[in-house]
Amino acid sequence: MPKKSPVAEVIDEAYPDADIARVGAAEVGRGPIGDIAAADGAIVVTNHGDDTVSLLYPGTLAVAGVVAVPGEPFAVVVADGRAYVSTTSENSDAIVVVDTVTQTVVATYSLAFSVTALAASPDGKRVFAARTGDGSADVVVIDTTAERVSTIEIATGAGIGIDAVQMDAAGKRLYVGTTDMDGSALVVVDVDKARVVRAVAVGSPIRDIAIGDGVAYVLVSDRSRGGAVEVIDLSSGAITGTAELGVGAPVQMVVSADQTRAHIVDYDNVTVLCMLTLKIVNKIKVDARPSCVAVDSEAGRLYVADYAGGVTALSVASAMPLLYSQFVEKTDPIHVAEVDEREPVTV
């Protein structure tokens, strides 16, 4: 049922950003929320406490349906009217496919080893599940049309793991964040050829990845440094910028469709980062510790889920008009020399 008390606080004294406003909140009521996805007019959350997935109405956040899944659900992605959910149980891990319209499980793909991250192609025809085994890490590719499963080997080594995967908008490159005993790397995979084409050393453990126009935004964190976002030029593989987030333990990042804002889940808030200036422009608090976020760019909404089983909706308008106005205000006027008007030449 809807929450009656205020549940979201935009901390605008130190980080002014007028583009964020709370528009609603509701209790899902099934314990801590593990992940949230918003796409195709559907909001899906995973409830790992009672082995279910809840579907919410975007307008009201009311629960539209609850679907039981085989095992504890964690990561979820939504594409082409389907929710793909990673689950774990005593017997095996699996990717469970839920039809968001009929609210039923329509397929299950059992997998060995632990699924640590999940992504889908823009058209929903392929789903990528990162796995970590004993000294090896790979990505399982599920062809959702042919219902076939294949594997792409990513890396081997002591302590190797994958914490994030992300697909580019063209559906041609998969970006994989790996971490081992020696550090971390952004691994680039040619999806059509099913092979690794590049690995870029990053350093601190990778927590999440977002892909922009020719760049990758990599969220990293460790105890000594805290959190940071590294900007990597995808053509050269060079780190071209860094946004230091300060003390904290960021775990997830989503970037708006216009690539002007990143929303980063930290220990007790959601940090809003301007991707053009790499400066923190706001911090959002909800009434419980945030666990995950999702952005529905078409609706202009940011959804923040928490460990108490609640979801808060905030409006997140594009920051481009605001940035343009700030640029105009801070730029000296451009003076154009006057041109004398002359009589037309006659022949």
Image (cartoon, rainbow, N blue to C red):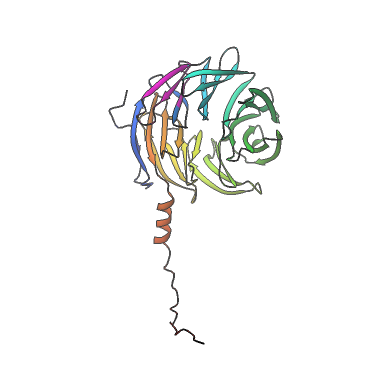
Q: Residue furthest top?
A: 91
Along the horizontal axis of the image, is 215 left or right of 312? right
Q: Residue furthest front?
A: 347
Along the horizontal axis of the image, is 273 left or right of 126? left
Q: Quadrant of the N terminus?
A: top left
Residue drawn 53% across the image and 42% down it: 228
Q: Which x, y percent locates residue 24?
A: 33, 32
Q: Which x, y percent locates residue 27?
A: 36, 24
Could you tell me how many numbered marks the image carries? 0
Q: Nearer the viewer, residue 142 or 139?
A: 142
Q: Nearer the viewer, residue 2 or 273?
A: 2
Viewer can see residue 205: no
Residue 329 higher or lower than 82, as above or below: below
Q: Residue furthest bottom?
A: 347
Residue 7 higher or lower than 331, as above or below: above
Q: Which x, y percent locates residue 161?
A: 63, 29
Give residue 340's quadrant in the image.
Answer: bottom left
Residue 267 higher or lower than 281, as above or below: above
Residue drawn 35% across the image and 27% down it: 26
Q: Is residue 154 magenta?
A: no
Residue drawn 51% across the image and 23% down it: 74
Q: Nearer the viewer, residue 270 or 87?
A: 87
The residues colored magenta run: 44-67
Along the horizontal axis of the image, is 143 left or right of 66? right
Along the horizontal axis of the image, is 260 left or right of 141? left
Q: Nearer the viewer, residue 173 or 274?
A: 173
Q: Which x, y percent locates residue 294?
A: 46, 34
Viewer can see residue 293: yes
